[in-house]
Image: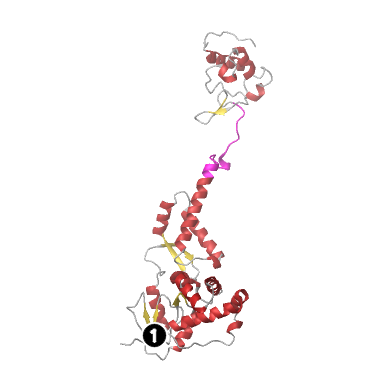
Amino acid sequence: MRTGKTGLDYFPLDVDFFDDEKIQFVSAKYDILGENVCIKLLMRVYRSGYCIHFGDDEALLFAKKIGVEKNIVDGVVKELLKRGFFSQNHFEKFEILTSNGIQKRFLEATKRRKKVEININYLIADIEGFNVNIIGQNDDISTQRRKKGERKEKEVGGNPLSPPTESIFISIPLNDKREYPITKTQVAEFKNLYPGIDVEQSLRTIKGWNLANPTNRKTKAGILKHINGWLARDQNQSRQKKTDDPRPPLKDRQATPTKCQNCQIKSSLLETDDSGKYLCPTCRGAKSYSEYTGDPGASIEALIGKAFNGGKGDESDTGIDEQDRVRQLRDQAAVLSGQEGEIDDVPY
């Protein structure tokens, strides 16, 4: 049995077609050759109906048939998509060339036909008042001359972006003015994948960026790649910061002491022990004065003299009486030398 006709034998061409700004951009880049490609593309679309699949293979055969280089065809199509002559969203999703205007003109030209079929996935135009059977994702629902309210209800039911039953944390705007919902379950999954960052705040930042950059928004097919790339970048930056600066935050840092936190003696050789205290070489448990100075022949008197900075003028700095300080140094020197209890007096 002969099937019904799908495409058109002719199509209307506006007398101002070449004055359209979209076509003028093509003409500015590719001259009359670009204009010719535009007309040939429209002829191919309307011959098929309201859209055509146009991948790399189709572009190659099309270029050969009309006698131009493939790079010219690719450039013209890219420019037409960029200017909105064809739907960028539908080309990215399905690799088809179509538009709202093309579909309107197709429906108007076929309104006397008994049966016109349109795939719901490709549908852009308003079909109210037209004799249309919807096929594709929801081909179990077919209607003729549907009311606008019925159409909207049907589209919501078959829309892959319709609100899910579980709770939504945030929605990211897409390039077709719809929004992609991120559920709390997805947020939990993101936290498992990116444990080093505040996932909720990163998602808010992503939404803010897309609100501020509408021309750079993603399609439904590309939004998850966009989100995961953003979270991964935040995770890597967080790790880099920890590696670069292992110190505590600036607000939690304290000034480095100038006195030993054990014996309270001023020293320029303070270092931290395992507990984090700043200690002088003596209080860090040096086994001998030679380990402190690097001089194997250094005496206990030399230790006292060096640690006390000559034994004069530092009482006010430490709060220790001069004689008490000498005795304290004497005891420390005795411990270092292994003569604890054997040194009765050390000359001052």
Q: Which residue is drawn at 43% across and 71% down?
A: 94
Q: Give, as a single range, the part of the protein colored magenta.
A: 241-259
Image quarter hosting the N terminus: bottom left
Residue 255 on the magenta span = yes
Kindly identify which residue carries mark 1.
116
Q: Please state if 339 lies on the left or on the right of 265 as rendered.
A: left
Q: Which residue is drawn at 40% across and 69% down?
A: 160
Viewer-side residue, 172 vs 34: 34
In percent of width and height, residue 66 lies at 51, 79
> Dot 1: within a 10 Å radius of its alpha carbon, few (fewer than 14), some, or many (20 or more) residues?
many
Viewer-side residue, 260 vs 119: 119
Secondary structure predominantly adopted by residues drawn in magenta: loop
Viewer-side residue, 27 vs 264: 27
Q: Number of marks in the image? A: 1
Q: Please state if 117 lies on the left or on the right of 243 as rendered.
A: left
Q: Residue at x 50, y 56 (%)?
A: 230
Q: In the displayed structure, would residue 260 be above or below residue 70? A: above
Element class at badge 1: loop
**In the rendered structure, which amino acid carries the disc numbered 1?**
Val
In percent of width and height, residue 48 lies at 43, 82
In percent of width and height, residue 274 lies at 49, 29
Q: In the displayed structure, would residue 246 be above or below residue 270? A: below
On the question of residue 49 being in view, the answer is: no
